[in-house]
Amino acid sequence: MKWNKSRLLMAGIGVVCMWVLAACSSTGKKAAQTVTRPDFSGDSAYLFVEQQLAMGPRVPNGQGHTDCIIFIVETLRRFGAEVTLQKGTMLNYAGKAQPVVNVIGRFLPDSLDTRVPFILLGAHYDTRPWCDEEDEYQDRFHNVPGANDGASGVAVLLEIARQLSMHGTLVPIEMVFFDVEDMGTPDFYTGQQREHTWCLGSQLWAQQAAPEQYRYGILVDMVGAPDAVFPREYYSMQYAENYQEQLWRRARELGHGRYFSDEASYPIVDDHYYINLAGVPCVDIIHYEVHSGTGFPSWWHTREDDLSNVSATTLQAVGEVIISCLN
Ligand SMILES: [Zn+2]
């Protein structure tokens, strides 16, 4: 993904409400309200990150990418999902045909009412072919390991899938593992500049989406760093403010407020942008550092995006917040 420098935020965000710590009991007395902490294992999610890194970079057209598709499909099936592959071809940054394979897994409640819309959970599984944020020019032609930028989001979704396999779901859930999110025009490319070169998987999905089938969506991207901070991303606020507020409120209630910041970020072109354009309100939970030079963490699109920058504690926090909103 990239941030959109041309759009400035119109206003900051105030804290909308405070969590009420006490509730009235049936006797009329005030009683401490216990927070229901959903089952989610950060350690299990971390293992899913390790398994992806063991495949090597998941760069489109490469072996690690193929292995990752098989891994996601088999894992989803093991956890009881109905799995389909959405295949197509999009034009890449150089105007060449690029195959796209989105992996879709659906989880349905036991008492199925087919009119109930899905909650969409999304993450991209591909990794960037170039480390174009490296300082040294010759280092920019390495593949990004993608521990955070790719594997972390997939890992959170797969751990949610594991929990759904044990506890079931109250609402229909569709997980979409997007392809070719991170093959946008590299900084060193000197050919003709094209628009919409990022997020090719979600652009394909958006072309075929039936928005009335969805209530809303949550996208996770770069959600594993020990010091992760998820600001209120601009497009999420514009298109899905109520859902964003619900997530950030749940984060505070669960004690994870240090990750979910009320600071506003620039618009970020990530998969949620195209999901929103398709008519499905979608919130992006993404690590963004408002005051850094690029806006993203120092390891972003470098060889440093490795396991040393992933924490099971952060994965746990993100997973708990999302699961607690699946109702
Ligand atoms: Zn990226």
Image (cartoon, rainbow, N blue to C red):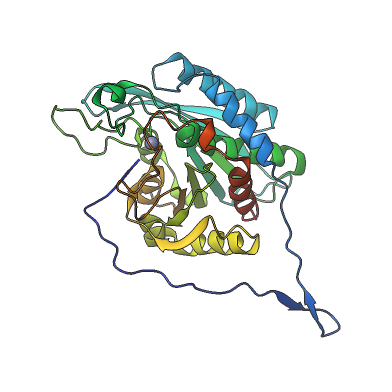
Relative side of 20 to 36, left or right: left
Judge by depth and name the residue closer to the eye, 238 or 233. 233
Please provide percent x and percent y for residue 230.
47, 53
Judge from the rendering whether residue 245 lies leftward or rightward of residue 42; answer left or right.
left
Q: Looking at the rendering, in which quadrant would you find the N terminus?
A: top left
In the rendered structure, the answer to whether residue 133 lies left or right of residue 111 reads: left
> Hey, which residue is sitting farthest right in the picture?
27
* Quadrant, the C terminus: bottom right
Question: Which is nearer the eye, 61 or 108?
Answer: 61
Q: Quadrant of residue 224?
A: top right
Considering every residue shown, the one lying at the far bottom of the view is 28
- Relative placement, left or right, of 228 versus 37 is left
**Residue at x 25%, y 32% (from the top left corner):** 185
Nearest the camera: 60 or 149? 149
State ligand 1's quadrant. top left
Q: Is residue 243 above or below residue 122?
A: below
Residue at (49%, 19%) from the top-left corner?
56
Residue in front for this viewpoint, 269 or 51: 51
Which picture quadrant has residue 75?
top right
User: Where residue 241 sits in the image (x, y, percent)?
Assistant: 45, 63
Q: Position of residue 246 (x, y in %)?
A: 55, 63
